[in-house]
Image (cartoon, rainbow, N blue to C red):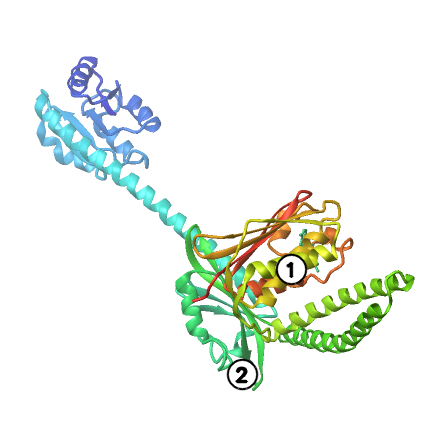
Amino acid sequence: MILIVDDKPENILSLKTILELHSFPTDTALSGEEALKKILRQSYALIIVDVQMPGMDGFEVAEAISGYSKARDVPILFLSAVSTEKKFITKGYSSGGIDYITKPIDADILLLKVKTFYRLYEQNRELNRIETSLRSEIEYRKKMEGELQERAGELHSILESLPQVAFTTRADGQIEFVNEQWLNYAPSKQEFPFTHPDDADLPRVWARTVAMGEALELEIRVRRIDSEQYRFHLLRAMPIREGETIVKWVGTFTDIEDQKQAVKRKDEFISIASHELKTPLTTIKAYMQLLDRSISTGNPTKQYVERALAQVRKLDNLIVELLDLSKIESGKLKFNKKLFSFEAMLSNAIEMIQQTYPDYHITRKGTADVELYGDETRIEQVIINYLTNAVKYSPDRKEIDIATVVKPDGRLFVEVRDYGIGIRKDHQADIFSKFYRVEESANRFQGLGIGLYICAEIIRRHEGEFGVESEPGEGSAFYFSVPLSVG
Ligand code: ADP
């Protein structure tokens, strides 16, 4: 907006007409005093002021404006009768843009000057806008930097308070911060702790982790710098992201040597105990079988012996499971793989279960008249385990389906379906883990929670896959698939 200041309304009108014809918005004031009031209230792009006015003249107006911080830089165009007054003008108003135009006013010259000032004004405004946005950008960055430093400080205090060895690295994996514990294990703040020569090479593992951008969990032996003895530690490292980008990594080494030793002692105990129990039990079983055979049918003692024998078999199965478990733990579960008739093995297994649980009805679906390469006894163990679980966890619905199919990709698929208590979704992923039993049903049904763990290991060792589909109250379908021939 351009402010025109003149005491003569006819002058104002003619200026206003010229300017508005060329789309310049205008405002007017009939005296210096009125102009000053307006300038205080509003910003103008240019002020055109008549030099000769009664009361406050043009120069005085300019001088007053130069005292206003708000309007100090607004350019002024003086209208004067004679051109020699220029040096006068400059004296009064030096900071803003200044020019004059002589009367009578030449419209072309006026427009030329107004346009120049207006362009300047707009450029100035644009510069101001850029400056303001730059300033706020700088402020924002400063604030962010401050916040970031504060957060890093907080993180470092937390890491310092941990009993573990802890560190952070930059996004590229360069160590950035280490807590006090670090120097008990590492030669310097820039290097990783000493690791056992037989374990993974830590700098290499770290480089790979950073390149993959995924969290790391690794059991690794490290030693204190003042000790020769390595202890198992769990190294966990997590990427810290801002949006999608990894900005740093934070990691800890936790001493797990004592747990490791405890687990080892427990495994050894299970192994020894199950071996020690197995020998006398085998003898008991043999004598019980002899006794059973020697008692003629119809003798009332026979049913007691048979009941005792059934319990002995249960005990025997539990001990066999424990023995298998300790073999898995010590890497001694051996497989005797050869080609065998799958259908024959399956029929045997079904018959055996059918005899043991005569009130259950097992329906065979599909055929699998194929030769399978694998350990027959172990595959049979999986099927018997699935079937006994199907019986055990279906006390009220006594139907079981067992389906087999050879898939086009040359894999044999086996599924045992029951209509029993089922398994909640949140338990399904865990039931193949060691000692896992569904809590709600654990008291109602006896077991050690290792049967499925052994099945999983057997199937894995046959390059197979396994799983379960189940609805609570509707039943479960346990399945596995193995390649017919390997390699
Ligand atoms: P165990 O039967 O000795 O407890 P398993 O390893 O065979 O151990 O099974 C683990 C757990 O999975 C069981 O405790 C039970 O909660 C659940 N489970 C296994 N089979 C079934 C099934 N057919 N129906 C319902 N739950 C089952």
User: Regarding ligand 1, which quadrant of the image does it lie in?
Assistant: bottom right
Residue depicted at 64% across the width and 60% down the height = 348
| Residue 348 seen in the figure | yes
Query: Please, is residue 348 above or below residue 17 in the view?
Result: below
Q: Nearer the viewer, mark 1 or mark 2?
A: 1
Query: Please, is residue 276 above or below residue 390 in the view?
Result: below
Depth check, front residue: 138 or 209: 209
Q: Amino acid at mark 1?
A: Ala
Q: What is the secondary structure assignment of the residue under circle 1?
A: helix
Depth check, front residue: 322 or 86: 322
Residue 73 percent coordinates (x, y)? 26, 36
Q: In which quadrant is the N terminus drawn?
A: top left
- Mark 1–mark 2 Cα distance, whole angstroms, equals 58 Å
Q: Amino acid at mark 2?
A: Ile
| Residue 174 seen in the figure | no
Tag 2 residue: 225
Callout 2: CB less than 8 Å from ligand 1: no
Q: What is the secondary structure assignment of the residue under circle 2?
A: loop
Q: Which mark is residue 24?
A: none
Q: Is residue 129 left or right of residue 266?
A: left
Residue depicted at 10% across the width and 21% down the height = 105
Q: Is label 1 in contact with label 2 (beta carbons under 8 Å)?
A: no
Residue 16 percent coordinates (x, y)? 19, 18
Depth check, front residue: 410 or 189: 410
Residue depicted at 19% across the width and 37% down the height = 91
Residue 227 percent coordinates (x, y)? 57, 85
Residue depicted at 47% across the width and 75% down the height = 200
Depth check, front residue: 61 or 460: 460
Tag 1 residue: 349
Q: In which quadrant is the C terminus drawn?
A: bottom left
Query: Please, is residue 115 above or below residue 235 in the view?
Result: above
